[in-house]
Amino acid sequence: MGEVDETFIQDPEHRPCLSIIEAEDIPLIDLSPIITSSSSSNPKAIKEVVKQIGSACKEWGFLQVINHGVPVETRHKLDTAVREFFKLPLEEKRKVRRDESKVMGYYDAELTKNVRDWKEVLDFVVKEPTVVPASPYPDDKEVTQWYNQWPEYPPQFREACEEYNEQVVKLGLKLMELIAMSLDLPANRFHGYFEDETSNLRINYYPPCPSPHLALGLGRHKDGGALTVLAQDDVGGLEIKRKTDGEWIRVKPIPHAFVINISNILQVWSNDRYDSVEHRALVNSEKERLSIGLSLNPAHYTLVKPLEELTDEQNPPKFRPYSWGKFMTHRKLTNFKKLNIDNIQIDQLRILE
Ligand code: OGA
Ligand code: NI
């Protein structure tokens, strides 16, 4: 059946529709008032941006930003290095292969909801080393450290990646300020959570696929962190599930823009005011596609729960508290094993009414 191995084939209800539906786009927000002026100099323009961010988060869970302050050159350098890396022979790429003891690095056999993704990935932590729990077991207090495995080729890879991470984390934290303001919280409300951040960079390389109607580059999922900042190239393939009707909507690539999405932790912090929306990536039979996602994640010891300022008797907490570090180690472990159960989802932490 088809021309791809059956491990890649999606159940019929999850197969993509390849004819592009012309639909409204996710909101595009110009951040120049934030980036070019100090926050006191143009309060009216900033208020307007905060308003746009708030309605995009509420209605879509997704948005794109332009004039975001990340230099074009920073992005270009990483893009070039990454394309060179993925062209290397498999045995060279596998020198930085990730496994159960070295969890960052190259991987070419990832599963999403137990179906294989048509992609190769590279994972890095932003802070080296990143301190995390040693195991997912709640009573085990031991911690461990995650290190990166830097490719030897191309030689400029590490520098390009570190520069990119620094710039994009800065943008991510700026966005967290705008999101805080959109929830009527102080701009710096979230900063403390990220002092010992566990943020990570995920580079997705999707080779051309002979059966793009049967397989997906990345199966439907929600992101686990607080916020994701994604750079996609001009090929296109990212789809998000529209909140109003559950339709899959293609996100149009815009040169130099970043796609931003609310991830699970922000959904919990905001007590469902903002949703973490399901998304997936399609492949095509002609072109390779590259996307680079930075997930902004809090310290491992963060107990994630609805913010007290956003809950009261009329609006009680909708989620049970959970340990971010334990959640993350559980996810990492299930990455290496084909399990009979899905990954833990935040909906399992929902308090039933
Ligand atoms: C991700 C992701 C989308 C894309 O890496 O979590 O959703 O377009 N990527 O590659
Ligand atoms: Ni994602």
Image (cartoon, rainbow, N blue to C red):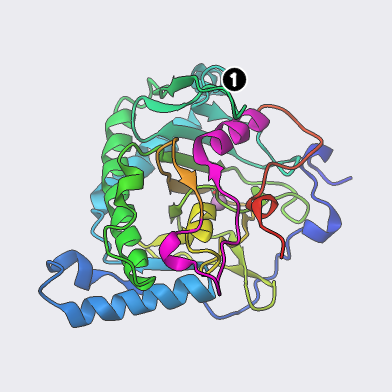
- Residue located at (32% from left, 29% from top): 158
- Please identify the residue farthest to the right as the structure is shown: 1
Q: Kindly identify which residue carries mark 1.
A: 100
Quadrant showing the C terminus: bottom right
Identify the magenta region. 306-335
Disc 1 C-beta below 8 A from ligand 1: no
Quadrant showing the N terminus: top right
Indicate left or right for 253 with 213 as reference. Answer: left
Vertical side of 52 occupied by 96: above or below: above
Foreground residue among 343 and 23: 343
Indicate left or right for 139 with 228 as reference. Answer: right
- Residue located at (27% from left, 50% from top): 170
**Residue 284 seen by the camera:** no
Crowdedness of circle 1 by 10 Å Cα count: few (<14), some, many (20+)? Answer: few
- Residue located at (15% from left, 67% from top): 36
Residue type at numbered disc 1: Glu
Q: Is residue 22 magenta?
A: no
Indicate left or right for 5 with 89 as reference. Answer: right
Q: Position of residue 237 (x, y in %)?
A: 58, 59
Q: Is residue 320 magenta?
A: yes
Q: Position of residue 18 (x, y in %)?
A: 70, 65
Vertical side of 15 occupied by 30: above or below: below
Indicate left or right for 210 with 187 as reference. Answer: right
SS type, badge 1: loop
Q: Position of residue 127 (x, y in %)?
A: 33, 32
